[in-house]
Image (spheres, coloured by chain):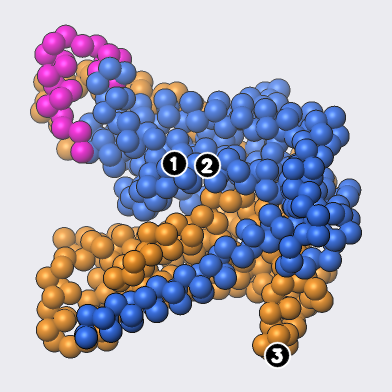
Amino acid sequence: MTTIRKFIAGFWLDAVSLLVISAIFVVPFIFIVLTAAKTGPEAAQFEFSPPSQFLLLENISAVLEFGDRRMFLAMWNSLIITVGSITLIVLLSSAVAFVMQRRKDRMASLASSIILAGLIIPPAVVPTIFLLQEIGLYRTLLGLIMVQVAFTLPFATITLRAFMASIPREIDEAAIIDGASPLQVYFRVILPLLRPAIITVIVVSSVTIYNDFTGPLYFLPGRENVTVQLTMYSYISQFSSQWHLLFANVLVITIPPLIMFMFFQRQIVAGLTSGAIKG
Amino acid sequence: MNHDLRPKSVLRTYPHWFYLPAAIVFGVFFLVPTLAAFYFSMTRWTLFDATYIGFDNYVRFFQDPQLTAGLRNTAIYAVMTSGLKVIISLPLAILLTSRLHLKSLLRGIIFFPVLVSTVAVGITFSVLMQPSQGLINTVLRALSLGAPDWLGNPSLALISVALVDVWKGLGIATVLFISGILSIPNDYFEAARLEGGAWVKFRYVILPLSRNAAFTVILLSFIGGLRTFDLIWTMTRGGPGFASDVLTSVIFKQYQAGFYGLSTAGNVILFILVTIIVYPLMRFFNRRELEEL
């Protein structure tokens, strides 16, 4: 009897939790899909209701076609920025994490204070714009990439350094005895062993950089430089009545993080809990 | 650690020049602008030339009621979001570490908004919070709980945006508490079970032993709250009027208006605010952690 009662009690707790949590966290996403599938006037009613005609694919293709296929340009730009930044971030931060964790000298503790400052201090926007202008990188993808790399390095380094500690020094020493040069130890021995932490860094920072709105807003103005996050911005300012397209746009740009989430949920959670603050 | 006793052949494998590429990028694109900000905040600045005017920008910043409102709102926003995240995510984490069958599904559901772009979340909630037809007020009216103008009422706008921030960031906070609770040795729970029921478990095991997780949640959401921009900008643009302006939106508005010196002064005030609040918290947090070792 008691086990049955326990089972039923457990069932109720599950059911109530699922109901409440879905109402709060899933309903907004359902709303996005419903609104993205409606006609313009119907979407402007803001109602949570099924669309009278299901126009999801039509609206999505309208978003993709809009303004000379601007969405494809935006996706291309975002892709270049994300991939370019991630490559540099992984190479630069793993090199620092490697030497920092293995040496633990005065230089390492200086680096560690600078990283801490980099984690908490917000970027100085106008001076950064000025700097980019002076060196000719303002309004260029490369300029934004360099800025994203600089802003993300502290998080990446701290995450990789924490993981470095779990790679035994004997492994490097064995490679040294075999006659490996510093670069060989780093590329052939350390980088492959850092793989789990590198995947975490790649996933977390690619989502952050892909989703970033402030960076492109300040450092990459101009129509030809549009990024994915700024595509929505023009719908709000110019076409405030086209809510169906706005939400179709929201849906389109939410797909990449959804894919990341489905494949890498564990790494993302690991990255945000372990590397987040301890270091 | 001043004298490393390892042989030179080993130390040579960890060359200092490995710092160099990262140091150059971080130095040029982060440290230089940050230090330059202190100078430019004391100038009338057009990007082509800068005239030194001493502390005028700061005086102006603290005299203009709109700008000081931004400062106050930033503090309210940071305190509110970090406080609510702790209060809501701790019970959630306890629920999601209990014997629930669906816990991994529910963890995933709560975590997903963390990965969605802030702009997308802001747009969606501006519509959901629409006063007459929006879903939130439709539900509230059905329960006869009133229908506030979430984003249009000046005394409510900042709070509404902060609530959306909590919605979006709750996943990280919950996950941090979950990993805190999961790292508590099982013996403690055993002892609590023998001593008494759920209250003992909560009050004398979970609450004290997830203190580190709580500090991390507070620290991270405080830093995030002080630096917030995307959500406020997509939902209210600081409005109505200046009711929900925070430091970062003031910085952006002054930048748009071409007051680069004033904008940079706002930026320096933000550095100082973040540092004087977060640095002591961090020291305190680390000391607590050392005491436990």
Q: Is residue B64 above or below residue A221?
A: below
Q: What's the mark number on residue A259?
A: 2
Q: Do the residues bearing badges 1 and 2 touch, measured as CB atoms within 8 Å? A: yes
Residues at badges 3 and 1 in contact (C-beta under 8 Å)? no
Q: Are marks 3 and 2 in contact (CB under 8 Å)?
A: no
Residue sitting at 11 percent across and 13 percent down?
A177
- Give the residue type that dot 1 points to: Phe
Residue that badge 1 annotates: A263
Residue B205 shown in magenta: no
Give the amino acid type for the residue marked by disc 3 in the picture: Ser
**Same chain? Circles 3 and 2:** no
Image position of B2 (left or right of A9)? left
Q: Find the distance from the CA under tag 3 to the CA under tag 2.
A: 40 Å
Label 2 crowding class (10 Å Cα cut-off): few <14, some 14-19, many 20+? few
Which residue in the rendered view is the most extreme toward the top?
A179
Give residue A72's position: percent from left, percent from top: 73, 30
- For chain A, the rendered hue is blue
